[in-house]
Image (cartoon, helix red, strand yellow):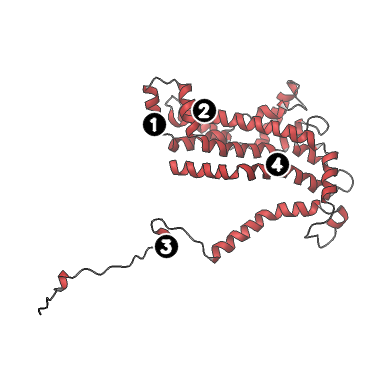
Amino acid sequence: MTTTLTKPEDAAPPVRKSRKPRAARAGGHMHGGPIAYAILVLFSIGSLFPLVWTAIAASRDNNRLAQTPPPFWFGSNLFHNLDVAWTDANLGEAFVNTTFVAGVSALTIVFLSTIAGFAFAKLRFRGRGALMLLVIGTMMVPPQLSVIPLYMMVAKLDWTDQLQAVIFPSLVSAFGVFFMRQYLIQALPDELIEAARMDGASSWRVVWHIVFPAARPAMAVLGMLMFVQTWNDFLWPFLVLTQTGNPTVQVAVAGLGRGYTPDQSLIMAGALLGTLPLLLVFAIFGKQIVGGIMQGAVKG
């Protein structure tokens, strides 16, 4: 029986254990520790507290809200206060008006911002950089500075207390143009546009068949943001609309609880009613919007 001696240099090198964390390995998932979960819970509670407090205040009466300490649980007047707020503020008409105004504004902003964002992102023309700086510069101007000239224009057009006075000033958004430009720079390859040009596609056909499908995730996000912003807008609708004419939700809620002692429970009931449609929209389309963001991030 013979034995074979192996030299040290001929021996197989020892297998080193990977020191990479579990989340960094291929196919691994990131797991948060207890500190991360504690922080998320705190932020979630802080985010939900205003909504929960609004519902609690809407379920109480004004005398109980004035006491110390304030109530921290629901009462029995919620449905009564909601019914009174709905009737007194004429919220049925206000919901229809606000849905129309927010819908038209959001669709128009998304359409125009996508076209303008594509032009700034992919087209080459003289003065493109200066025009883009001008668009971004308008975002630095406080919106309160434009209230007086806008109101003078609306008064000359005899649009006071009419919905077009709220719709037309919000049909264009500098933020929307900048948002779509930044998205299309990464999400839309130049080769795709050049191939369409070589096939004889016109500019409008390129926009309709290439730009819009590629920008769909960002368009959904922008539409949601603009819808929420228009729905929650208060200052300009409050100046040009009245509660008895064509009110939006925010204008109608502002007229609740008037008197020497404002009825806080009634105001909170109106605010809760004005918030519920936004929560419903996000509950229905939130998953698609988040999925669109992730899809756009992967394409970029």
Q: Determine whether, in the image, residue 95 is placed left or right of residue 281.
A: right
Residue under the point 76% across and 26% down: 162
Which badge, 2 or 3, is on the more N-terminal residue? 3
Q: Position of residue 65 (x, y in %)?
A: 83, 56
Q: How much space separates mark 2 and mark 3, taking CA atoms?
A: 44 Å
Give the foreground label among 4 and 2. 4
Dots 1, 4 in contact, CB < 8 A? no
Q: The disc labelled 4 sits on which kind of residue?
A: Pro
Residue under the point 38% across and 56% down: 26
Q: The disc labelled 2 sits on which kind of residue?
A: Ile
Dots 4, 2 in contact, CB < 8 A? no
Mark 1, residue position: 190
Residue most extreme to the right: 260
Q: Position of residue 240 (x, y in %)?
A: 76, 30
Q: Which mark is residue 115?
A: 2
Q: Secondary structure at mark 4?
A: helix
Which badge, 1 or 2, is on the more N-terminal residue? 2
Q: Which mark is residue 22?
A: 3
Q: The N terminus appears in which quarter of the rendering?
A: bottom left
Q: The disc labelled 3 sits on which kind of residue?
A: Arg
Q: Position of residue 225 (x, y in %)?
A: 61, 39
Q: Which mark is residue 277?
A: 4
Q: The C terminus appears in which quarter of the rendering?
A: top left
Q: How much space separates mark 3 and mark 1, taking CA atoms?
A: 38 Å
